[in-house]
Every structure is written in C-alpha cells, then in structure tokens.
Image (cartoon, coloured by chain):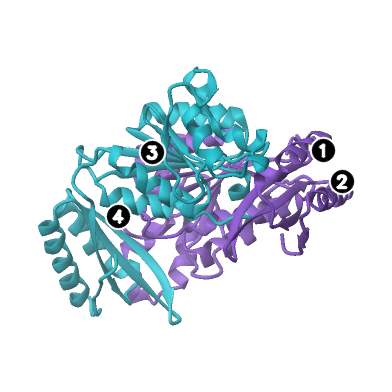
Chain colours: A cyan, B purple
Amino acid sequence: MSDKQTPSVCLIIIGNEILSGRTQDTNLAYIGRRLNELGLELREVRVVPDVEADIVKAVNECRTAYDYVFTTGGIGPTHDDITARCIAKAFGVPIERNPHAVALISQSYKPEDLNEARLSMADMPKGATLIENPVSMAPGFQYQNVFVLAGIPSVMQAMFESVKYKLTGGAPISSRTVSAFLGEGVIAQGLGELQERYPDLEIGSYPFFRSRRFGISLVVRGTDTDRLDQAAAELKDLIRSLGGKPVEDTAT
Amino acid sequence: MSDKQTPSVCLIIIGNEILSGRTQDTNLAYIGRRLNELGLELREVRVVPDVEADIVKAVNECRTAYDYVFTTGGIGPTHDDITARCIAKAFGVPIERNPHAVALISQSYKPEDLNEARLSMADMPKGATLIENPVSMAPGFQYQNVFVLAGIPSVMQAMFESVKYKLTGGAPISSRTVSAFLGEGVIAQGLGELQERYPDLEIGSYPFFRSRRFGISLVVRGTDTDRLDQAAAELKDLIRSLGGKPVEDTAT
C-alpha cells in the first residue's frame, strides 16, 4: 500500500510465553484486521520478553517511527507484569497510582480481597488516560500515541473496541482474494505484470497445500474498491488463460 | 533466563499477509519451542512487510544483536518474494543464481514447466549455503548467522529440522507448569517471593478464562531440572496454602 493517507501502526507483543512457544498469539491477526477496516495499517510487530531494557527500547524506537503503537500483555498484578513501569521509563515520566483506576479495581473486589498486588494494576505513567476494560475491570491506558492493552484475547479485544474511536484512520483497506490450483511459478510472470499495471494496489501470492495439491491464493488489497474489482477480474482472466479455474473467496 | 550460556535468536517474519491478519502465523511458536529444546532462546521476533527497506533494516539490526537470525517467508517465485535480494543487500554482497539450487529446482519440474520465475528461486547472496527442502525442493539458504526459511509451515519445519545441527545450543530449557483456579492477585505476593528465591529460574503467571472461571497457569523455566522440580513443589505448596488445588500439566 503506497497510500500516504493510511496512518501506520506498530504492535509490541510483550511476554516470554509467546517467545517460548507456550502461548499461540492471536492478538496480532485481530488487530491487523481491525486496523485495516478502520483505515490504518499494521506496519510492524515486535515480540519482546518480560525484560525492562528490551521493552523500553522497543517502545522508544516504535513510538517515534509510527503514528500509533499498541502493546499487549504484562499489565496484571504479578512480578512479571512490568509493562506500565516500562512505558513510564520510555517517556521519562514518573509512575503513579491512578485514582480513577483504583476506584475501578476497588469496585470489582470484595474489600477483604483487595490487596496491594491488585491495587498495583492502577500504577500508570503520570498523565495516562484509562482504557476501559468491560471484561475484568482492571483498565489499560493510553500515554500519547501508545495504547497499552491486556494480553488475554477477550480482554484485549474489548479494550481495542473501547479505544478505537481515538484512532484517526484513512479510507478502509479492502481486499479481494482469488484462489486456484495453479503453481506459483506458472502465474508468477503474469502476476508481476498485473502488479505493474496496478501500482496503487498491493498484490500478494500465497501458496497453500490442500487436498494433497499445491494451490495459490492471490490477494489484492487497496482502498479503491472499483480498482480492486477491476484487478480481481483481470486476475480471473489470467488464471483462466493459464488453464486454471479461479475461485473468489467471499471472506477475505 | 539469565543463563549466559544460552545463545540468543531473533526471528524475522516477512509478509504482508501476517500483518493484515489474513494469515495466522504459527511458525513463531514452533521455532520458539524447538529452540528451547535445543538449548537456545528466541529473544525477539519482528514481523515486517514485503518492503525492501524494512526487511534490510530488520536484518541488519538483528544479525548484529543476536547470535542467530531466522527469517520466514518471501522466498517463492512471485514479484512479492524479495527476501533473498534483501539479505544480499543487508550484507552488501551481490546476488547470483546458485548452480546447486538450479539443479535441485530443475529436477523437480518437467523441462517444459521450468521457467524463469521458478529458476529465480535459485537467486541467493553470493556465498550462501543451501538449506535442504525435502517437501517441495526449492531450497532455503544460510548466509553467515542468518537462516532463510520458507513461510509455509510444513516446508518451514522441514527446513528447520534439516538445518538445526548448525546451531550451537546450551543446556536445553525445560519447564514445569502448575495451574489452579485462583486469582492472579491472590497469589501475586507469594509468587514474587518465590521468584526472588529462584533468580536462576524464570517464573511466569498466565491467567486464563475456562469453564466460566478465571484461573492461572504458572510456568517455571530454566536449564536445571532439579531446581525446576524444587520450585514446582514449592509452587504447589503455595497454591494449597491459599486454598487452591494445584494441577501439574504434563505437556508444558
């Protein structure tokens, strides 16, 4: 996508459990899809361990390089939840116990269950604004262009949906997907020529192995739906000219 | 893990389809797990688009910061497969058609199906050594400490297994996982104290939502299995002392 009107986003996934392979991340795909619908583009993702220096470095490199940064993970009450203090350190601001967050957290526990660990989830960079958590109450937060979300997918998604109105997007990015049982090498030349005729669109080729046969899904992405339809029609003609049977996926 | 004997690895996942959320990556988890078994640690992951400048930058930053770098994706025959030329550019070496790769690719097609696009999969940085692809023949390659693998999981896995003997690992990283239906906030203090008593191990707390209840999986990781067993036993005692019922996962 060469559309300069599409704001760029970086996602920083924080957590040893992702890097060790113990937990399969699904937040990337959710955020990537939703950003496209909102007219923004996920441009880079970094996965970093629960190590202060690594998190601070990633946040500082990415918050200056991209319009928005999202982080997921590391905002619970245990010793390995260090995201909030890392964000404060990255911005060079003190961390403080946010009174509004304390109120939200206090409401969700019986008085005898409210302890220091749970209250520590209200520690945030001074000046942060809260991101609502309709699932389990303990809020995320925003500091400048950095949005700090939970790692649990259901909580992360609820937080994303409650904060999305703060993002200024361009035109939504749409796509058309056409698949066929053709070798990538068979269509490569014609596909490259098609990409040259549509420099405003992004054409990707993704091989798959299904029913014991290799096939390809060809994905055209862009903001102009008329151009997308034109390119998809040309793509189907190209596949037919090579002896293939094009199938347009409705869910792309 | 503070073990200095554990070599560090960075994975660079190349592909617009991952960033758009169209394709759910599973290569990260596979590589993370296998590296731990081989005594190496996946320390960072970056996901970058099919854009030359982005790929070159990521490769150059990561190949100097980590012992090994793996890349996945972008080594097919179509216009969006630009990984090989980006690796060459990152190292400042010319790209050339590798004769051994040409031979492998030629063997896997009938002469009339062998075209320029397919042969282009043999283009590699001058001096690269091949990584065998037992699934679909077109090889990956190694250049210095960078290992370039396919994106399709079955092909990536086969390439990883054929190249793993080139990695020098430390002691394998093992783990013990104990789960319980306890709130994270209930166990946070005791867990933090346990982590302080075991600075050589890494203790992570991962909340989950199952059978309509919140619970936690506590994961202890390290290279010394006796210490792991000790810490897991203490963890179970801690859970019991808080009124919980510890369950040790056999597959961690």
Mark 1, secondary structure of its residue: loop
Query: Looking at the image, which residue is at 16% across and 59% down?
Result: A228
Residue B240: % across, % down: 82, 53
Ranked by sequence position, the earlier of labels 2 and 1 is: 1
Under mark 1, the amino acid is: Tyr
Residue to which mark 1 is pinned: B198
Of badges 4 and 1, nearer the viewer stands 1
Q: Nearer the viewer, mark 4 or mark 2?
A: 2
Subunit that carries the residue with mark 1:
B
Residue B227 placement, left or right of B53: right
Residue A112: give x, y in percent of width and height.
68, 41
The span from disc 2 to disc 1 (Cα, nearest Å) is: 8 Å
Say which label, 1 or 3, has the lower sequence index.
Answer: 3
Q: Amino acid at mark 3?
A: Asp
Q: Is residue A139 left or right of residue B219?
A: left
Cα distance between the residues tagged 4 and 2: 52 Å
Q: Secondary structure at mark 4?
A: loop
Task: Residue B165: name its quadrant.
Answer: bottom right
Tell me whether marks 4 and 2 sit on the same chain: yes
Chain of the residue on which disc 3 is drawn = B
Q: Chain of mark 2?
A: B
* Residue B132, quarter of the rendered image: bottom right
Q: Which residue is mark 2?
A: B227
Residue A188 visible (yes or no):
no
Mark drawn on residue B54: 3
Give the number of the disc on residue B79.
4
- The type of residue carrying mark 4 is His
Kindly tell me whether residue B163 is visible in this rendering. yes
Which residue is rendered at x = 19% and y = 58% of the image? A193
Counting residues from the N terminus, which is met first, the one under dot 4 or under dot 3? 3
